[in-house]
Amino acid sequence: MNTMTYKGYTARIEFDERDAIFVGRVLGVKAIIGFHGETVTELRADFESAIDFMIDDCKARGETPEKPASGKLMLRVPPEVHAAALVAAQATGKSLNQWAAEILGKAAHV
């Protein structure tokens, strides 16, 4: 997956072969924020403009711009997975939260 990042926001980038343009969509937010460009330079400029516009628009309305993630994650997993994860965390001397954050970070290549 090709991505771009600006001010903490990440977008997925694709090439639209039919229209011969790059298109992007911001990930991790409820709002649909899309942008495009014929070149990478145009694509990046449109991405940055879209993010800046969203931030400015929120401020004008007295709202806090949505962040891609709050840092809180609730998961529903089968009890046997929960138990196995708890044992794995304890075996490494970590809390389940510390262990899960590490495992998720590795899986997401962070």
Image (cartoon, rainbow, N blue to C red):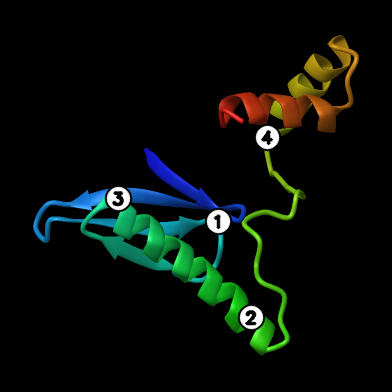
- Where residue 86 sits, quadrant-wise, is top right
Which of the marked residues, 2 or 1, is nearer the chain's N terminus? 1
Query: Type of residue at label 2?
Result: Cys
Query: Type of residue at label 1?
Result: Gly
Residue nearest the observer in this picture, 103 or 41: 41
Residue reaching furthest to the bottom: 61
Residue at 30% from the left image edge and 59% from the top image edge? 42
Question: In front: mark 3 or mark 2?
Answer: 3
The local secondary structure at tag 3 comes to helix
Q: Is residue 18 left or right of residue 69?
A: left
Residue at label 1?
Answer: 28
Residue at 62% from the left image edge and 24% from the top image edge? 106
Residue at 51% from the left image edge and 71% from the top image edge? 31
- Residue 99: x and y in percent read 79, 24
Quarter of the picture containing the C terminus is: top right
Please report contact status of discs 3 and 1: CB closer than 8 Å, yes or no: no
Query: Type of residue at label 4?
Result: Pro
Q: Which mark is residue 78?
A: 4
Q: Which mark is residue 79?
A: none
Q: Is residue 30 left or right of residue 17?
A: right
Residue at 69% from the left image edge and 44% from the top image edge? 76
The local secondary structure at tag 1 comes to loop
Spatial separation of the CA atoms under disc 3 and disc 1? 22 Å
- Residue 35: x and y in percent read 35, 65
The local secondary structure at tag 4 comes to loop
